[in-house]
Image: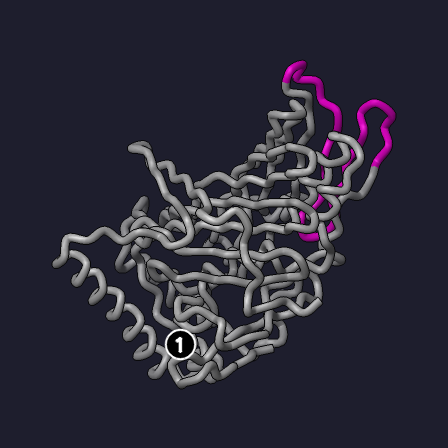
Amino acid sequence: MMQVTGAGNDESRIVLTKPVTLEGESDIDYTAPNPLQLVLSLFKNVMPGSDLSRFQLPPTFNIPKSQLQCFGESVYCIATDMLSRCNGGKSPHDRFIAVTAWSISTLRPVMFGVAPYNPILGETHHVSSGNLNVLLEQVSHHPPVSALHATDEKENVELIWCHHPSPKFHGTSVEAEVLGKRQLKLLNHRETYVMNSLNLLIRFLPGPRTDWVGKVKIQCQETGLEAELCFRSNSFLWCRGNHRSVKGKILDSSSLQTLYEIDGHWDRTVGVKDISNGKLTIIYNAKEVISGLNAPIVKDPKEVWPSESAIVWSDVSQSILSKDWEKAREAKKVVEEKQRELLRERDSRGETWIPKHFTVSHSKEGGWDCSPIQKWVPPAPIVVPL
């Protein structure tokens, strides 16, 4: 459901839409345009192997929300409290299995042929879901880097993520390598779980589809446990058995002994088998976790920051939802031109933009690290109804 909230003036309208769920955005009357137009545009304007991070999509290929919102939704829009399960595990093995299931729960289906807006520099997204407060900030525009900090003081849990997509065009497909470190801290247990992100694969031929693919490694130095997960897509031969599959293992890093085997499909169910006794347990059910998700609502419009995604892109989103494409193009042009003007002003003064909520560092090799300035994320004026 779309929500438009006035926050004092026309420039502060807040547009929020339903999050991406297992079934897709079914309550939004929005149909992607002919994907062939996008493919032809790529063939015409971009060489194979090119970095697409600066490629601008027209609004006809945008969904009505920012990438920053989609990134945050994978954490705060969830029907089952997977983070509490991580913290509530009685043994290191129980907690590690729960963290593995939670990491799988952050995946969402991606619609083919459309994409969210590229966040502007300094854009923020601040949402609360129960006791979990989530804050995101776009800390770099070229290259695009998003930082996420989420805390739950009741459970004493903290998330720190750095998200740096690097999309490349390969002729018949686009693959976005998602760089950056993800950390989940269970502070009651003094355990930190470090993991990487999957790649997003968009295939045009032999049939259009999108999938999350690649390998994820989850490590906990304090317990000596680690997981190796492999996510697969359909093959060219459309082998149904591989569609959205996940296979892997949990092992003791010191002895390299496999303790558990993981098998399933991230859009259905995933099970874990205890090697010691052969017992199989379902640790993740996508239908229970990412179905029927609620859209965030505005609890206190006056407290929403002007940098909030739902305000920055409100005119564009409203125009897309009403299918007024000319107005959407003009509104998007206004947002982009304002950013260029701010950049010119900073350059003329010799100023360097500094994030408000994170300390950012990066190496010559291209790695990025984002550290939150505040210990705890404050409650947000935008909330997810439970």
In the image, what residue occupies the spot 31% across and 58% down?
55
Above-or-below relation of 282 to 291? above
Location of residue 116 by image quarter: bottom left
Image location (x, y in percent) of residue 27: 62, 76
Above-or-below relation of 241 to 341? above
In the image, what residue occupies the spot 49% across and 53% down?
206
Q: How many marks?
A: 1
Inspect this view and state whether residue 173 appears: no
Residue 256 shown in magenta? yes
Inspect this view and state whether residue 159 appears: yes
Location of residue 382 by image quarter: bottom right
In the image, what residue occupies the spot 48% across and 80% down?
321
Q: Which residue is mark 1?
A: 316
Location of residue 260 by image quarter: top right
Residue 89 shown in magenta? no
Q: In the displayed image of the protein, which residue is found farthest to the left?
A: 348
Nearer to the camera, 276 or 299: 299
Q: Which residues are magenta?
A: 254-280
Crowd rating for badge 1 (residues with CA inside 10 Å; few <14, some 14–19, many 20+): many
Image location (x, y in percent) of residue 162: 46, 45
Amino acid found under the numbered disc labelled 1: Val
Image location (x, y in percent) of residue 2: 56, 78
Which quadrant of the rendered structure holds the C terminus?
bottom right
Image location (x, y in percent) of residue 200: 49, 49
